[in-house]
Image (cartoon, helix red, strand yellow):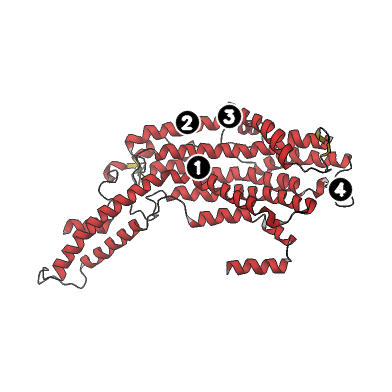
Amino acid sequence: MTDVKRITSHQAAPIGVATTSIDHVLRPVGDGHASVPAASRIGIGAPYDFSLILGGPLFQLLRRTRLSGNALELVRQRTVAIVAVAWLPLLVLSIVERQAWGPGGGVFFLRDIEANARFLIALPLLILAELVVHERMRPVVQQFLDCGLVREDEVPRFEAAVASATRLRNSVLAELMLIALVYVVGVMVLWRQYVAMSGVTWYGRPSPDGLTLSRTGMWYAYVSLPLYQFLLVRWYYRMFIWARFLFQVSRMELSLIPTHPDRVGGLGFVSNVAFAFTPLAVAHGVMLAGVIGNRIFYAGAALPNFKVEIVVLILFVICIVLGPFLVFAPQLAAAKRTGLREYGTLAERYVREFDAKWLRGGAPPDEPFVGSGDVQSLADLANSFDVVKTMHVAPVTRDALLRLVGATVAPIVPLALTMMSLEELLRKLLGMIF
């Protein structure tokens, strides 16, 4: 009976789930007033040893040109410089060619919603997202060790996964292939065949041989657009590295605790990373909003015509941000089943002894019921079992999901003004919220 009370009151790890002894994990460091997991001092020395952002040829180029510091400082200067290369020459050349602004409903440069939204809003968001993700994600890799999720015998595999991710992040060949992909597929195929408008625009006019580009269009097609697309696909490449790293970690035997308060076995810190990708989600919404805006104002389309595109974009953003977390589902599901079985057995033992002692006359005559720790232990055990029962099988929260959806859709919402008045739109939005 005493052993059962001790287990329930201290929330010990369930039998069968891999754990590490407290005495073995916590060791004094420094002046002896703090302790850290021993695994955190094996291999990875500091939280900033791995970053999904700090690396690669472009990062090194920005450092050498004094547009970035070692930790992505100078974000304002970097944003202004990159936007100036992508957007400012288009403005100057369109003015020279008298395509910046004009009468009527023609597609002039300053009236092109898609191009200006891409370079003045989405592009800065892609750059800002690097700093946000770097700062939010930097301690995550270290937390796998600090929280004791990686057993000491799995640390070499964990270090190998970090080293592999670092090599991919720093790969010169990978970024060269991304550049080739942008020009061959992004510009020559996707943009020319599916995205570029078919009528007369500021960047070109149709001809029997296809789209004939102006001088402004040449800069747009071979400098501005590839620069933007490269930064975008570079983000997809980084998301691939992140997903691959999480997959490798999920193949290890993690020390998951079913009774952890985060209800994902101790992996709650992983789901918090999703919030860092909010600027990236907004950038995707801006991109689609620009395309839809041009089609509405210059091709006679209506917003409801793009329901499929909006839904596909939302699902795409959810998949690239939250999808990688699903690799932990098998281990979390197994930990939940183990926890339910073992805590169910423990609860069965305890309630039977509680019943025999306090309801069947087994308690000593001199032991008072009021103030007995048995009742509190029973409540603690019930709370522990409830935590196990409500444990999630993936470190994905509803808040993260709603924020991603909201961030993606927010830039598209103003286009609803093409269908209704501002007052009617606000009334509908408030009705959805309240």
Residue 358, image x, y percentages: 16, 70
Using the rendered view, name the quadrant where residue 192 is placed: top right
* Label 2: element kind: helix
Amino acid marked by disc 4: Trp
Residue 284, image x, y percentages: 64, 47
> Which residue carries the number 1 mark?
138
User: Which class describes the residues within 10 Å of circle 3: few (<14), some (14-19), or many (20+)?
Assistant: some
Q: Is residue 396 visible?
A: yes
User: Which class describes the residues within 10 Å of circle 1: few (<14), some (14-19), or many (20+)?
Assistant: many
* Sequence-first tag of 2 and 1: 1
For the image shown, how many numbered marks are present on the structure?
4
Q: Residue at left 81%, top 50%?
A: 111
> Which residue carries the number 2 mark?
164
Would you place residue 281 above or below residue 417 in this image? Answer: above
Disc number placed over residue 174 in the picture, else none? 3
* Sequence-first tag of 1 and 4: 4
Amino acid marked by disc 3: Ala
Would you place residue 97 above or below residue 381 in this image? Answer: above
